[in-house]
Image: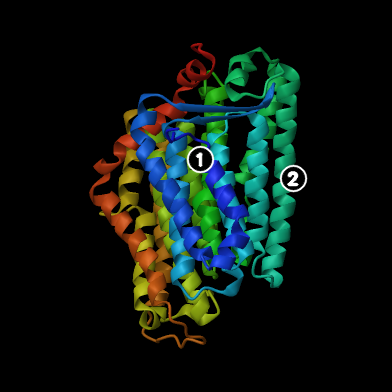
Amino acid sequence: MAFQLTPVWFIALPLLVAFAAPLWVRLGLLMSMLFATPLVLFGLAVSLFPAVGDAPLLETIVIAPPLGIHLHLDSASLLMVALFNLAGVLFASFLWLGDTEPHLRGRGPFVLILLLITGCTGLVLTGDLFNLYVFLEIAGVSAYALSALRRDKTALEAGLKYLIIGSVAAIFILLAIVLLYLETGQLNLAALARDFGDIPAAMQGLIGLLLLVGLGVKAELFPFNVWVPDIYRGSDPAVTSLFSGILVKAFLFVLFHLVFLLLADPAVARAWLMALGALTMLVAELVALRQQDMRRMLAYSSLGQVGLITLALGFASEATTAGALFHMVNHTLVKMLLFFVAALMLRRFLSLRLADLRGVGHAMPVATALFVLGSLAVLGLPPLSGFVSKLCILKGFAEAQAFWPIALILLAALIEAGYYFRWIKVFYDSDPAAPQCRSDDGPAYLPLVLIAGLLLLLGVAPFLIEDWFVQAARALLGRGTILESVLGVQS
């Protein structure tokens, strides 16, 4: 029988590899399998881009009617799947090549990392609410455990906070799912989109509010994100790169996928989502100015970028949506680079406080140079990819003659420049820092250099993949295409 590529492989393969962890331990292949699994899936995702550009790939696995698993792979979800697995490759290579702490190299972390990637992949592929909740819990439980891996006081506190807050958010989402099922008798997303308009307006508002609160917490939107810096501060910086790089992106995708799918006119939610995005961006950037710990500073910086992406996606035009998806990719690469640098500095200096890193540029010149490059990419300076994605967003707003978002984005960039250059200035202080703990991190720099190369490549030659973002934007906004492909009806 001929091998057939279907969306199932993106979920089944990491699950199978994760549950075979005892075998990989026995064979001494644990780290190599952690690297190879997302690499294979990334290759599969890239190979499928031409196919999903013509028509989405659907897969339905019936357990016992009406129960089943429906997977929907289009250009938007495939872009996310490719991004998640690319992040998995970079993360695994950082662990494999570096002198990583034992708490990141055992069988437990191996399983949790693959389950996190699986959960995030399932969130963007699933076509029904039941399995969306299942994947939400898989991703959430994996993240809670990963945040507490170090098992010191701050890590355990972070894990407990994450567990409590994540569980409360999941309850809001579950309540919305229950109400949707009671009102429509459906769990399939396409069928819900067809019937959602028949629900009474008051109930629509309640369901929308429950989803907004639950997914707003998960996607780290203001005012539901005050807990985030504590989680980032307590977790291992390398693990935090996965939270910022893929977990938040998965929940952002789910939030906007549901908005664009359920609402025949997304303009109904535009004001709320753009307001949340603008507030998230400005508040996070202003608070980042005062931070003395690198992990908290990077956490608030990440929240600011999430706000920017939300602002652009909420506008719901093809141009700003394509730019926002491009910025998602850039933000994942940049934040992984910066958190990897933070992990290397923490390993050597045992602290990430600004005062303790004075002159670190003399002790760790390569790491500091990579931090500078990542900072410039966050700020959106040429020739880095952050410049191109921000320019796409700004052009999209300008073409629609919406100028207040442009002003806010430029203001946020100025604030960002203030605190990033403050840290860079301290790093290159004339008084060299004296490391308290030395380690051989040479090979660990390879994935960091690869990320830096990607940021430069996408900045100089964005035309290599810009069509992917346009196709993904059309798929994300294309409510009618989804209804026709799943139900055979036009919206």
Q: Nearer the viewer, residue 163 or 376?
A: 163
Vertical order, 54 against 306 (above or below): above
Sequence-first disc among 2 and 1: 1
Q: Label 1: state its secondary structure.
A: helix
Which circle marks residue 322 in the picture? none
Q: At label 2, which amino acid type do we have?
A: Val
> Which residue lies under the disc numbered 1?
9
Q: Residue at x 27, y 53 (%)?
A: 457
Q: Nearer the viewer, residue 2 or 29?
A: 2
* Residue 276 seen in this snapshot: no
- Looking at the figure, which quarter contains the N terminus? top left
* Residue 160 seen in this snapshot: yes
Q: In the figure, residue 462 lies in which quadrant?
A: top left
Q: Residue at x 62, y 50 (%)?
A: 225
Q: How is the image coloured?
A: rainbow
Q: Position of residue 87 (x, y in %)?
A: 45, 54
Mark 2 and mark 1: Cα distance apart in space = 31 Å
Q: At label 1, which amino acid type do we have?
A: Trp
Of badges 2 and 1, nearer the viewer stands 1
Vertical order, 202 against 92 (above or below): above
Q: Nearer the viewer, residue 1 or 61?
A: 1
Q: Position of residue 124 (x, y in %)?
A: 53, 37
> Which residue lies under the disc numbered 2?
168
Label 2: few (<14), some (14–19) or many (≥20) C-alpha neighbours in 10 Å: some
Q: In the figure, residue 276 lies in which quadrant?
A: top right
Q: Label 2: state its secondary structure.
A: helix
Label 1: few (<14), some (14–19) or many (≥20) C-alpha neighbours in 10 Å: few
Q: Position of residue 217 (x, y in %)?
A: 64, 45
Q: In the figure, residue 67 lies in which quadrant?
A: top right
